Image (spheres, helix red, strand yellow):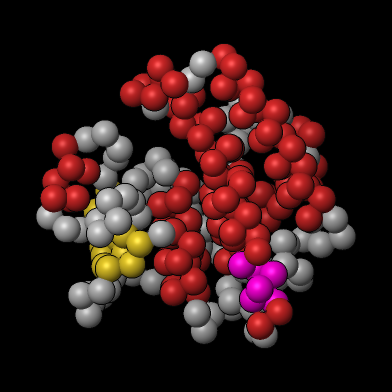
Amino acid sequence: MTDLTLYSMPSSGNSYKVRLLLALLGRPYAHVPIETDTPELAEAKAAGHLPLGKLPALHLGCGTILSESNAILWYLGADTAWMPEGALAQARMLGWMFFEQNRHEPVVAVRASLATYPHLAGEATPERMATLLEEGHRILGLMEAGLDGQDWFCGAAPTLADIALYAYTHTAGTRGGYDMGRFARLTRWCARMAALPGYVGLLDGG
């Protein structure tokens, strides 16, 4: 039995973050997979399962529903090795998590979505895709610099920031068309993430 039920989109990096952390923590949960642009998504919204109208949403046994992927990571990661000790270390971790949602996801994830989902094909104009490619390479370059001299984004051990950043970075080449060959540190970091005990891939069942 489990007191956690996760509504998530199997192909979404934001949803994948939560499934990955749950797997790495070894926490059981019930999974309700719902893809975008489907009747199931509309039904979940109408039933009140997605209070903010989007995935992922984590339902707790007490009846509380948590939204926003990085907020869910914070809740699940509290009092675990994925949360560093001390206000300064936590602030640095949050800095990368805010960076992921405010700068990385709107570019890297959006380009991948435009290239992947048929219902978005009309928005994938050559001009927009070129702009997202250029900006995405710049953002990935900032991440590459952030790994200078260290294996993880917040120092000697992986934190929630690594999970947040990994979700859309590890498929930036295959789904978004970014040239990951430019980023040797990022490539090695992705390999370290994939080698963690309990790791599950984006499309692995959960």
Placement of the C terminus among the 4 image quadrants = bottom left
Q: How many marks?
A: 0
Q: Residue furthest top?
A: 126
Residue in front for this viewpoint, 157 or 118: 118
Placement of the N terminus among the 4 image quadrants = bottom left
Q: Residue at x 53, y 80 (%)?
A: 80
Q: Is residue 86 visible?
A: yes
Q: Is residue 26 above or below residue 96?
A: below
Q: Is residue 93 magenta?
A: yes
Q: Position of residue 186 (x, y in %)?
A: 73, 47
* Overall secondary structure of the magenta section: helix
Is 180 positioned to the left or the right of 61 in the image?
right
Q: Position of residue 192 (x, y in %)?
A: 68, 55
Q: Is residue 31 visible?
A: no
Region in magenta: 89-94
Q: Residue at x 61, y 67 (%)?
A: 94
- The quarter of the picture where residue 66 lies is bottom left
Residue in front for this viewpoint, 157 or 95: 95
Q: Is residue 135 magenta?
A: no
Q: Residue at x 76, y 69 (%)?
A: 155
Residue in front for this viewpoint, 201 or 40: 40
Q: Residue furthest right?
A: 149
- The quarter of the picture where residue 52 lies is bottom left
Q: Is residue 168 above or below residue 128?
A: below
Q: Residue at x 58, y 73 (%)?
A: 82
Q: Position of residue 17 (x, y in %)?
A: 48, 56
Q: Position of residue 120 (x, y in %)?
A: 39, 24
Is 193 positioned to the left or the right of 76 in the image?
right
